[in-house]
Amino acid sequence: MVHRGPQRALFLAAGALVAAGLAGCEYANDVGPEPSLPTARQGPATAAPPLPVASMDPGLKAEQDRNMAAVELLLADVPSGAGGVAGAISGHSGAGGGLTFTGVLTEAGAYTVTAVCVGAAEAQLVVTSRGSTGTTHRIDVPCGEPVSEQVELNTGPVTAYIVSADEDRVHKAAMGAVRLLDPRH
């Protein structure tokens, strides 16, 4: 009979050495990235501080406020009627400048459109009625005095758009207003 006790012990010892040697080796992870573990205690998550909003030049803001006050004075005796809007009219007409009023007219007829501007030499008012027969009216508005005209408008959507007419220069402080007075008044 053959006795294999010392051979078996030697084999087990060699296996233990190989296992211990391999335990210190590093293997690439083929199944994805290692999950990250926090290295220190983390507090509650906080959002990044908001970016500051660009501030307007104080001189420009003051000029716009003065011009808007002048627009309101010029329109003090003009009733608001079917609607209207007031605000900045600076910019170029094709580049998103100007001021727009939109509404829906329930009655066709001769409406009085009043426009005023301050802060530019002149403005242009375009009134479009998109009812059954669309109509467009273009009115030149010299700044500094209200301009009123009678225009025939249809029932349905109406748009009044006023913009500084000087396409060569943007009048940053130009302000304006448009009012529509319905035929019943």
Image: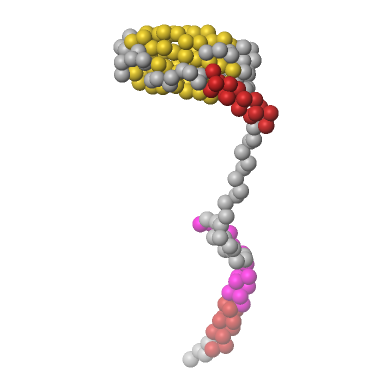
Question: Is residue 156 shown left or right of residue 126?
Answer: left
- Residue 27 among magenta residues: yes
Question: Is residue 185 shown left or right of residue 161?
Answer: left
The residue sitting at 56% across, 12% down in the picture is 145
- Where is 78 relative to 47, above or below? above
- Where is 31 relative to 146, above or below? below
- Does residue 95 appear in this view? no
The residue sitting at 36% across, 9% down in the picture is 110
The residue sitting at 61% across, 38% down in the picture is 53
Please provide percent x and percent y for residue 112. Answer: 41, 12
Please provide percent x and percent y for residue 122. Answer: 58, 11
The residue sitting at 38% across, 20% down in the picture is 82
First to last magenta residue range: 17-31
In this figure, which colouring scheme has been used for the structure?
secondary structure
- Does residue 17 appear in this view? yes
Q: Quadrant of residue 180?
A: top left
- Where is 51 relative to 56, above or below? below
Q: Quadrant of residue 165?
A: top right
Question: Is residue 48 shown left or right of residue 181?
Answer: right
Q: Quadrant of the C terminus?
A: top left
All told, the count of numbered labels is 0
Q: Which residue is at the front of the view, 33 or 37?
A: 37
- Residue 86 among magenta residues: no
Please provide percent x and percent y for residue 11. Answer: 57, 80
Q: Which residue is at the front of the view, 144 or 61?
A: 144
Please provide percent x and percent y for residue 134. Answer: 36, 10
Which residue is at the far front? Answer: 77
